[in-house]
Every structure is written in structure tokens, then in C-alpha cells.
Image (tube, rainbow, N blue to C red):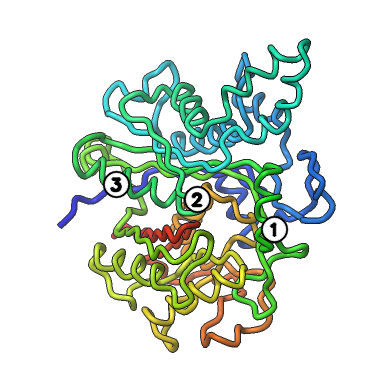
Amino acid sequence: MHSKVFLTGKGVISSIGKNAEENYQSLIRKKHGLKYTQLLDTFHKEVFPVCEISMTNEELIALLNIQNPVGYTRTALLGMIAVKEALEDAGIEWKNNTLEKKYKTALINSTTVGGMRHTEEVYLDLLKPDMQSESESYIDTHDLGECTERIADYFGVHSYVTTISTACSSSANSIMLGMRLIQQGIVDRAICGGTDSLSKFTINGFNTLMILDKEHCRPFDNTRVGLNLGEGAGYVILESERIVQEEHKKPTCYVSGFANTNDAFHQTASSPEGDGAYMAMNQALEYAHLKPSDISYINVHGTATPNNDLSEGRAIERLFGTTNTPKFSSTKPFTGHTLAACGGIEAVYAMLAIEHQVIFPSLNFKDKMEELTIEPTTDVIENYKVDHVLSNSFGFGGNNSTVIISKVV
């Protein structure tokens, strides 16, 4: 048996709320965050709606009380806000570098955009001699690891700091690595999740792939054409049994299973039969010593692209059958597809589902897919017995990750 690793804290910021409670209220009230961008200067600003956080960088900086804001990217700022909430939720003191005084802590951060958004804003200024010095401070923040270092320094994490970038499965993989580090005794706790901001590069890139929807996305709907992009950050705090016992904590959730597979089918597409998704879900169940019938709710990857939903749907039917499939939904119509952050945000949503014993709905679903028998739930289902939530995160290149979050009994 594997040693148990508990989830003691959660933090999230997205287009539907700047903390976990606001996100929860939006989910149960079916309040989405889709609109045209007000903060990103893009050629497509009135073409493709996005799930944008309405706060400016200046407002985020003020919320974090950062005195010298030079070099802080939007990606890093969003991550800091979500990590701050997660630490506070876990009852962990971090000011004055006290976070690691007693327990070794890891920060496993995920991102795909990093500081790219700021690079887009300033790179032309490098051609102007009078603007070079100010612009150079942001060129140094372009790489993915820089925002991780900013977050680590802000909270005083030094024992283990790393960055994961496996596209849309990044945050789920960060949770898996955190689990392993704790189980192997390398650290006592881990801050795991991800952060991504909207950028022109990602909007242009997904538009080139022809998988952006000009309307509100419709996961698992027969008329789906693509996704809506979003921005945000989500993190969970993983802690060992030793910490939970010594600090007399009473967590409600723990990570019972996880798996990462790669079907290597295509650079940007999943295999038509969902081979990688099937293997990830099946192996996660095996790790957790659970049967398919034990799963209460599936937070599907559910991007609303023609390929993903067909592939994931076939994998679910293959593993769970077509008659007793668990309740499932995609929360991406609420938040948009937040890329590397989605697994962290949806891990927070899994915890909320267990804590409140509720199933969240899929928005905009009307017509069942011709190829599938199953269909997502479209209603908020309260007072539902939620013991085990299976959360899927599938990235480009066939990197498929599944995390199972379970109720502490």
C-alpha cells in the first residue's frame, strides 16, 4: 500500500471568481466568465470570446502588496494569488520565510505561457534606444521557469522548486510529482498546480489549428466546433500523514490515484478510440484500488473540440460502460480552457464537489453526440453522494493524465 497523501488546502482564481468560494458560487449558479477581452490587445479581440479575469495587473499587484512590481508577469501574479489562498486554507504560515521552518516544502508549478504575454507587449520596444532598459526587464521573464522562481521567492520555498510544461496535462502532472516526492520522503509537503494568462500567441495558435469557437463552447454536444480560451490559476496543498497527525489537521480529501500515459498518436490530436485516455483512467483506478463503479463524478477534460470529446467519450464508455457511467461534466464552459492551469483549477473543483457533495453541470449541452451513448449532466445536483472524483487532463502530444481525489472517511 502507498502512504496516504492528504489535500489540506486549495486556491483558485479564474474568470468566475478570485477565490474558491466565488468559483463555487458561480459553478452552482451556472455563471460563466465568457466575454470579449478588455485587457489583451489582440487582432481577434472582437472575434473570439475568452474567459478573462477582469482584474488589471496593477490590481493584482495591489492585492499581493508587492512594493517593487517590475518584472512580475501576469502569469506569476495569478499564480501567487492562488497559492496564497491555498496556503491560508491549509493554515500554513508563510510570511517572513517561516514556511519551511519545520517542514520541507516543494513548489511544483506548471505553465505553458510563462512571460510570453509581456514579451509580446515589449519586444518591439527593444528597437527603440530610449525604451530598451524598461523592456529588457520583461525579456528576462519570458521563460517558463521564471514565474515559478518568482512564486517560490514570494513565499519562501527553497527545498524543491521545479516547473512542468506538458501542455494541458501540466497541473495534473504536478500533483503526481508532488505525490511521489512526499511518498519517497524527499519533502513533507508540496504546493502543486499551475497558472497561465491569455496571450496573443495562444489565441493565434489555436486559431491556426481551427479549434476556437466564435460562440460559447459546447462540450460533448453534437454541434461542437471548438474551445474558448481562458486564464487563471489553481493550486492544491499536498501534505504527508506525519504533518496531518502532528498538526492535528482534519482534511476532507486525499489523492487516492493517479496515472500518466502517452498514446503518441499525433502532435495535437488524441487517438480516435481514446487509447491513452483509457489507459490513464484505468491505471489511476488500479493505483487507487478502486473499481469503475466506485467513481461518483468525472470532471472530464471536455474541451469541446471534435477530436477530444469523441476520443475521451469513447474511452469513458470503454472503461465505465454505457449504462452505469458516473455523472460527468466539463467545467471549461465556465472558465475557458486555461491550458496548463486547468488540472489545478479542476482539482480544486473536485475538492469542492466532495466538500459540498455536489455535481457541477456542463453548460450549453443540447444534442447528444451521434457516436456516443453517454451524455454529460446539465444540472447542478446537490446532496449527491460524492466519494471519489476522477479528473482528466489531456495535453498535446498524447500526454494523458488522470487524478482521483477521494473523500476522507
Q: Quadrant of residue 40?
A: top right
Mark closer to the chain start, 1 or 3? 1
CA distance for labels 1 and 2: 23 Å
Residue at the disc numbered 2: 167
Residue 117 relative to residue 125: left or right: left
Circle 3: residue type: Met
Residue 315 relative to residue 216: left or right: left
* CB under 8 Å between discs 1 and 2: no
Q: Is residue 286 above or below residue 375?
A: above
User: In this orientation, does residue 29 appear?
Assistant: no
Secondary-structure class at tag 1 = loop
Residue at the disc numbered 3: 179
If the image is split into quadrants, where does the C terminus sit? bottom left
- Foreground disc of the pair 3, 2: 2
Q: Position of residue 20 (x, y in %)?
A: 55, 47
The residue most toward the front is: 127
The residue most toward the left is: 1
Secondary-structure class at tag 2 = helix
Q: Position of residue 356 (x, y in %)?
A: 48, 60
Mark closer to the chain start, 3 or 2? 2
Please rate how many residues cluster around mark 1, counting C-alpha atoms within 10 Å: few if below 14, some from 14 to 19, many from 20: many
Label disc, if present, on residue 32 of the rendered structure: 1
Q: Is residue 148 above or below residue 265?
A: above
Circle 2: residue type: Ala
